[in-house]
Amino acid sequence: MSKLPSFEGARVLVVGDVMLDRYWFGDVHRISPEAPVPVLKVSRVEERPGGAANVARNITSLGARCTLLSVVGADEAGDCLQRLLTEQGGVEALLHRDNGFSTIVKLRAVARQQQLLRIDFETPPSHEVLQAKLADFKEKLPHCDVVVLSDYGKGGLTHIAEMIRLARAAGKPVLVDPKGDDYARYQGATLLTPNRSEFRDVAGGWSSEAELNAKAEKLRTELHLEALLVTRSEEGMSLFRAGSMRHEPTRAREVFDVSGAGDTVIATLAVMMASGADLADAVCIANRAAGIVVGKLGTAVVSRAEILEDMRG
């Protein structure tokens, strides 16, 4: 692709599981006398939007407009996510508060760019608050160009089949980042973006590219998808459409952290498609964006300027 479209007019609606990524950065100089574990002396704390919130933040970082629908707890972590998204990220964040739900927090302890430990805090949201989110979805749907459903398997997309049906009936492309082994609920989506291990869990293993192609086409046909994109880590990504396959190899670069790379991929695809780009061109640029973001530590974002710089290089 020779020219990158302007993203200013693109409007993306994101629905999914949000979480707060907390990082404790420090140094380790000794082992604890209480147990054979390293003692991390924390020197810096960072908080970043994670999950579907990271998808939304990537969308606005590229220069597009984003509305995010999700559920958080009535707690400090939920307040922090709202602030990070609206004040710093420029996201229209409609976060339903659930008094019986704790905002999902992933706490990572990091020393010298190496993760020592991750601690997760999570509970499933209530049915009532999920119904309210579906009502918001119906209201916001006419005002977007593309819908992204970011499924982290935390219970926030109970009504995903209905959301896909409504969006497709309204003529909106639907991009889904899947989770788990029940892909039937994603039936009718425009594009599914499983990573290599997620695809293997659903379709089974393969011993050749021909076998992978056959399995991908079988899944795409069964789910009535327009396309299937399998992200394959160091092997790049492969796009499967009716009667065709396109592979984008990984560009060689130093990798610091692959966490959140899938968020960057689906965010870039959505912004490209909302800007009128062909799916093949969208995959090419998403591959570049993923290559940039894995060179950053933790959940991170990519800007349009960084992609342009990469294209010039």
Image (cartoon, rainbow, N blue to C red):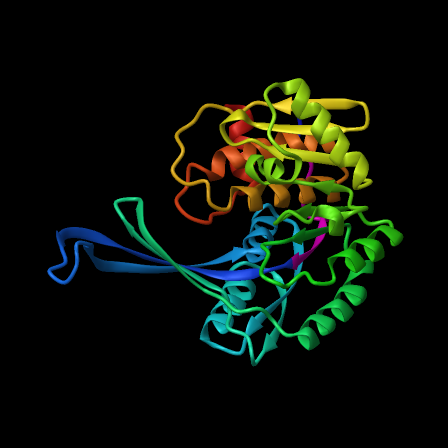
Give 200 or 6, whichever is nearer the viewer.
200
Which quarter shows the N terminus? Answer: top right
Assess whether residue 98 is covered by the magenta stretch: no
Q: How many marks?
A: 0
Q: Answer with left or right where residue 33 lies relative to residue 178.
A: left
Q: Residue at x 50, y 46 (%)?
A: 260
Left of 306 or right of it: where is 4?
right
Q: Nearer the viewer, residue 259 or 210?
A: 210
Report if residue 277 is visible in the image: no
Q: Position of residue 228 (x, y in %)?
A: 71, 35
Q: Indicate whether 133 appears above or below 164.
A: below
- In the picture, residue 221 is in which quadrant? top right
**Considering only vertical position in the picture, is 50 above or below 70?**
above
Question: Residue 76: image x %, image y %?
Answer: 45, 75
Kindly give the residue lying farthest to the front in the view shown. Answer: 204
Does residue 153 lie above or below 278 as drawn?
below
Report the magenta residues as a range: 4-15
Query: Residue at 52% across / 29% down in the picture?
Result: 310
Q: Quadrant of residue 142?
A: bottom right
Q: Is 88 displayed left or right of 217 in the figure? A: left
- Tell which residue pokes out farthest to the right in this image: 169
Q: Is residue 266 visible?
A: yes
Q: Nearer the viewer, residue 76 or 191?
A: 191
Q: Position of residue 137 (x, y in %)?
A: 76, 64
Q: Please name whichever residue, 9 or 20, is drawn nearer the observer in this view of the structure.
A: 20
Q: Position of residue 80 (x, y in %)?
A: 47, 69
